[in-house]
Amino acid sequence: FLFPLTLPNSYHFGYVEIQPPKLLCPHKQFDLHKNAYGYFNNSEQLAAVNNGGQYSNHCDSKHKQRVAIIVPFRNRTEHLKIFLQHMHSFLIKQNQIDYQIFIIEQADDKPFNRANLLNIGFQESIGLDHKIDCFIFHDVDILPMNIEQTYSCTKLPKHLCSYLDKFRFVLIYPTLFGGAITISAEQFRQVNGYSNLYSGWGGEDDDFYQRVQHQFGLIERYPSDVARCIMIKHGHDGPSNVERQKLLADVLGRMSIDGLSTLNQTYVRKSIESYPLYTKIRAELN
Ligand code: UDH
Ligand code: NGS
């Protein structure tokens, strides 16, 4: 029988669809040159980036955010080069935030631990710049295509790039929270960051979704024509985490005792290096 539908159609299972926020400053008027793969590279704009991969947009708004872009990394130098050119070109044209790109390199041969590296990126970048108020955790192989996909924090933690070319621009499941996300510094502290225990591929983003869902109820996404991204093609280059289902069975039980609160015992910082387009932080995991 007929049931009165009271929820606005922006609500979906697990997330709410939002429109990009009102622009603080107009987009910059230069063309984003795309190569045959659709990657951006605007060399004139890249010259505007300060050493360490920092950019200030000179946009005079009291709502302007100071954003750290945190990228987990090991042995993906070819992706990194494309990512840096594309991301700086994109963000400078978008013209909404002051930002710095931090590459967090796992400096050991243990299974890759993406979430642990993201926590390290949070702690180390805040240590370098206390004024950072928004975080974008971003894989090195994902590139935004649509300039309307505004890279900044909104009310709730938000999934970016929900619609990937690799999956023919379909959201593969409604609670997907991997690849690229935004979250305020305060919200990240409230969920105790990511779990440090997901060693190897898979599950750490689903764990983080549960933390955020528990704390804030929903995540946000932009519409499917806006949140479109390219994924640089590559094979699977690391072991899957065979423990992930076990860990996912008790996410909330561990939330307060596994994350930022236990981060210091999980790594040793090896170096902080400034390059023209990024700051690299190398860490050895325990
Ligand atoms: N990363 C590295 N080096 C690695 C592994 C991961 O830098 O050796 C970083 C990088 O930023 C990458 C991100 O972690 O974008 C995510 O890792 P991924 O690209 O390997 O994972 P993704 O889920 O793709 O994007 C995996 C390919 C298909 C997995 C199929 C599993 N059955
Ligand atoms: C899920 C994984 C996530 C992963 C997502 C998309 O199955 O970590 O696939 O992966 N969860 C588990 O393994 C429990 S993708 O195909 O895009 O590489 O993010």
Image (tube, rainbow, N blue to C red):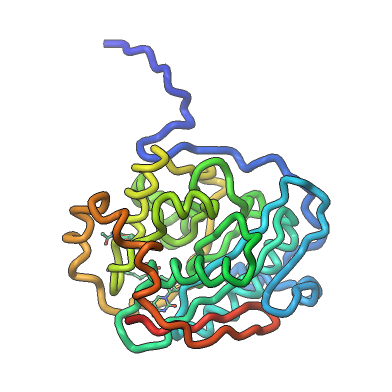
User: Would residue 21 be found to the left or right of residue 238 on screen?
Assistant: right
Spot occupied by residue 104 in the image (x, y as percentages of width and height): 50, 77
User: Which quadrant would the C terminus be assigned to in this image?
Assistant: bottom left
User: Would residue 209 be found to the left or right of residue 185 on screen?
Assistant: left
Spot occupied by residue 32 in the image (x, y as percentages of width and height): 73, 64
In this orientation, which residue lies closer to the viewer: 129 or 221? 129
Q: Would you place residue 182 above or below residue 19 in this image?
A: below
Q: In which quarter of the image is residue 194?
A: bottom left
Q: How many marks?
A: 0
In this orientation, which residue lies closer to the viewer: 71 or 164? 71
Residue at (23, 51) in percent of width and height:
253
Residue at (66, 84) in percent of width and height:
275
Spot occupied by residue 153 in the image (x, y as percentages of width and height): 59, 49
User: Which quadrant would the N terminus be assigned to in this image?
Assistant: top left
Residue at (22, 64) in percent of width and height:
244
Q: Would you place residue 19 above or below residue 122 in this image?
A: above
Q: Quadrant of residue 216?
A: top left
In this orientation, which residue lies closer to the viewer: 209 or 8? 209
Residue at (46, 78) in percent of width and height:
73
Q: Would you place residue 218 above or below residue 101 in this image?
A: above
User: Would residue 110 be found to the left or right of residue 41 on screen?
Assistant: left
Ligand 1, by image quadrant, is: bottom left
Spot occupied by residue 81 in the image (x, y as percentages of width and height): 59, 81
